[in-house]
Image (cartoon, grey):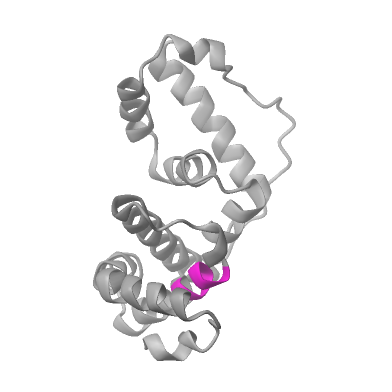
Amino acid sequence: MVGSFMSAISDEGQRCLVEQLYIDHEREMYSVAFRVLKNKADAEDAVHHSFEVIIDKLDRISFRDKAKSRALLLIVAKNTALNMLRSRTKTIPLSEIGEECVKVSFEELDAVDAAQIREAVGKLPEEMRHAVMLRFVYGFSTEETSELLKLSTHVIYRRVRQARELLRNYLGV
């Protein structure tokens, strides 16, 4: 399956990188997708679509840190599978939310150490944690995060806002 999307990559170095990522993480990505979709063919499709998303954003992603690379690939695979599952079910459009965005200032976080922040982020619901990780750990814009997670920017803004509220409560700031 790796050959079907490799033709989209013109740079030999990037092609080798994607091939290595596929070799290293395809089985885990498949497992994540299969747990969501409960169908072998659909899980394979989800992995394929995940790599298409990754290839499209390849120039924006650093794969130096293996743990972060693995996490990113698994998040993309899970969200691709969830999107496939959602596309099969009837959806209700989100209503507009008029609340002000909750902000956490750097001054408030000065008193909190990194271990507390990591622990608090780990307590976040998975969908919020993915949005926060992609936005603030991996440095993607809201638009890029929405593309990677295949969600609207409105949903990303909402999840980040809700995550900030929860983090503020968890951290007591």
**Residue 80 position within the rendered picture, expressed as x and y whole percent measured from the top left:** 46, 66
| Residue 165 among magenta residues | no
Q: Quadrant of the N terminus?
A: bottom left
The residue sitting at 40% across, 14% down in the picture is 112
To which quarter of the image does residue 167 belong? top left
Q: Is residue 94 left or right of residue 58?
A: right
Percent position of residue 48, x then y = 43, 79
Q: Position of residue 106 (x, y in %)?
A: 55, 17
User: Where 140 sits versus 20, above or below?
Assistant: above
Residue under the point 34% across and 53% down:
71
Q: Is residue 30 above or below residue 141?
A: below
Residue 88 appears anywhere in the view? no
Does the magenta segment cover residue 54? yes
Residue 67: horizontal and vertical position, in percent?
Answer: 29, 51
Magenta span: predominant SS is helix
Tell which of 109 and 19 is nearer to you. 19
Q: Quadrant of residue 162?
A: top right
First to last magenta residue range: 51-56
Determine the residue positioned at 39% across, 19% down.
170
